[in-house]
Image (tube, rainbow, N blue to C red):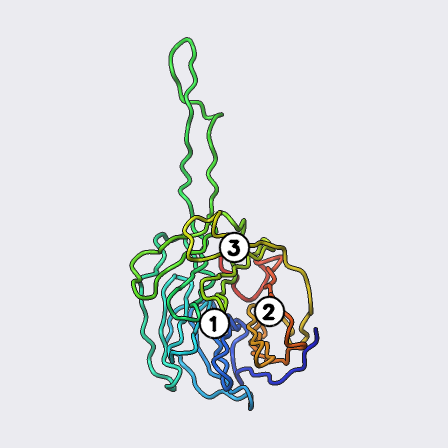
Amino acid sequence: MSSDTLFSWSPLETAESWYVSDVCICGVKQVIGSLSDGVSATVVSVDINSGKKTAEWKQIPTAVVSLGAFATSPVLFAFDKEGSIWQLDIRSNGTHPTSSSALSCRRPGDVAHAGAISSDGHSLAVAMTMANETTKKKNKKSNAVGDQASSSDDESVEPLTYSVQLWDVRNIVSPLHSYSRSHSDDVQAVSFSFDQPSLLISGGADGLVNIFDSRIPNEDDALQFTCQVHTVKELEEHKDLIRCARYDVNQRLIVTGADDCRICGSELLPPVVDVFVAKGKPKDKLRRRKPYVR
């Protein structure tokens, strides 16, 4: 598989701490990208043909981790790290977005890493890392004096749960169900199939790509396929960590965003190749200038 660069856009002036957190292809004319410094976010629209910015939304006071849209609606969904969803009208230019706190994290240690909306607009998926209670269970053993609790028999509790939660867009009160055992590290990306909206793909920092039938509540039954990622093609348009990538087979287009604060569009060849794109996890998070949320 090879690619030819079609456009490359970056803001004229921006601090080094800013990066592209996600991109979204909206039809044949525009690409939406979210820029963030880990604290706040700006969402921009870029024309695919000219590579120029056509709209900008600056009023999001939190870090956006993922974007989602579906073909029959002008509404763009922006998922932030707190678990909230922002709704933007992509027909407008700079109109103040509205937000819903229905998906806010339930505990301070919970972090949302990615979100997606199905192509029929009915389902939402949110990938979260959730902090567990650190309490331990103690077993009792018998001795001459009586029953005593033994600390040697403590059952340790995993500190984090890596979960994909499924929601009904029409009733965002509580998740329908969640899948919490199929990944052993942060779930970095989720996406619904365009042709089969019930199929959900998740990719994690554990190197696994999982495919679920999101209609099935039981995780073991819902898991249809799992595999480890491997390199098909390395894109050379960026000079730093690539955080996000989206592709459109019909347009033969792949769009990427990275820590160099650039949004790049490339031609995807051949058009029949199925692509999974994995984000790299920084080896030393403390030394990187860009925040890596955990």
Q: Quadrant of residue 51?
A: bottom right
Q: How many marks?
A: 3
Q: Measured from the top left, where is residue 39 in percent x and y? A: 43, 67
Give me the residue at 60% from left, 65% from top.
276
* Badge nearest the viewer, 1 or 3: 3
Element class at badge 1: strand
Query: Is label 2 in contact with label 3 (beta carbons under 8 Å)?
Result: no
For mark 1, what is the residue? 36
Q: CA distance from mark 2 to mark 3?
A: 16 Å
Amino acid on which the number 2 mark rests in the picture: Ile
3D distance between C-alphas at marks 1 and 3: 20 Å
Q: Mark 2 or mark 1: name the one nearer the start of the chain.
A: 1
Kind of residue indicated by mark 1: Ser
Label 2: few (<14), some (14–19) or many (≥20) C-alpha neighbours in 10 Å = many
Mark 2 lies on residue: 242
What number is the disc on residue 186?
Answer: 3
